[in-house]
Image (tube, helix red, strand yellow):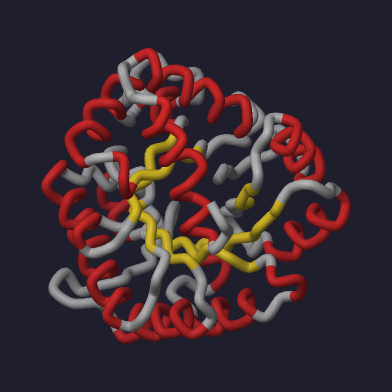
Amino acid sequence: MATFGGSSLDDIELARKARDYGMRAIVIKPTTFESASRAYLARKMVPGIEVFGGLVLNTYVGGMNPAAVEGFARLAGRTAKVVWFPSSDAEQQIRFYKLNRTAVRVSDGQRLLPETLAVLDAIAKHKLVLATSHVSSEEALMIIREGRARGIQGIVVTHAIQDPINMTVEQMKEAVRLGAFVEHTVLGMFKGPESHLGPFFSRQRRFTIADHAAVINAVGAANMILSSDLGQFFNPTAPHGIKAFMEGLKREGISDVDIDLMSRKNPARLLGLNP
């Protein structure tokens, strides 16, 4: 599975490249609007690969808006698949980076807000995949518990070790115990003080392949997935990044069996495909 946001490739080019790299499926991750309609077109134009769409609950779609989830789920072609909680507009994101804009809140710090519960119900109703996105690690665990209680089967902790989430190993183990997958993405390796991505990314911590390998060894590959978070015009393409990520993990001692599990079998389970 590859998630991405940006414009290095259009959706048709991405689908073709992913297919040519041997990928079975991709999820197009938007930042400002749904991508299921785009996935539907890409799937028709590029045979031989499954293309799915997503929805990120930032302010552009009304934040924690169950009506947006309902509309997304009803788009043609059964390509609607993943709902991400807020990313750039998440309260945790804005607090962590001291940004000056209105936040999309999911909790009051102690309990999930009514609109968050309504979103979870809509995700469960339509059997969509939930990704926790840039909420705090504590909120992510609250969301996982409540989501599972409401019948959501597929849940992903979005790039759990990276800013602004910063889950501990023990929190990741708890997420796994609750039935969630923990995601590792390529983009974190391009962040840090020497980042080529600009001031915002240079403020973030850089995570090496060795850092990811250490967490995989500590938590276990059984409930991990590898993703990219790439696609931006200033970065490698998502298929290229995923391939390099897998090769790097292998050099760090992660077995072929575990890499296959995290890059192929677990994403297939998450997306409802036969592994």
Instruction: Pick the residue in front: 9 or 267.
Output: 267
Residue 269 placement (x, y as % from top left): 48, 57
Instruction: Pick the residue in front: 15 or 59.
Output: 15
Residue 119 placement (x, y as % from top left): 43, 79
Q: Is residue 88 above or below residue 37?
A: above
Count the labels in the image.
Answer: 0
Q: Residue furthest right?
A: 45
Residue 97, can we see it?
Answer: no
Residue 106, can we see it?
Answer: yes
Rendered residue at 20%/41% (across/down): 219
Q: Quadrant of residue 80?
A: bottom right
**The N terminus sits in image quarter:** top right
Residue 274 placement (x, y as % from top left): 57, 57
Residue 124 placement (x, y as % from top left): 44, 80
Q: Is residue 175 above or below residue 262?
A: below
Q: Is residue 15 rendered to the left or right of residue 227?
A: right
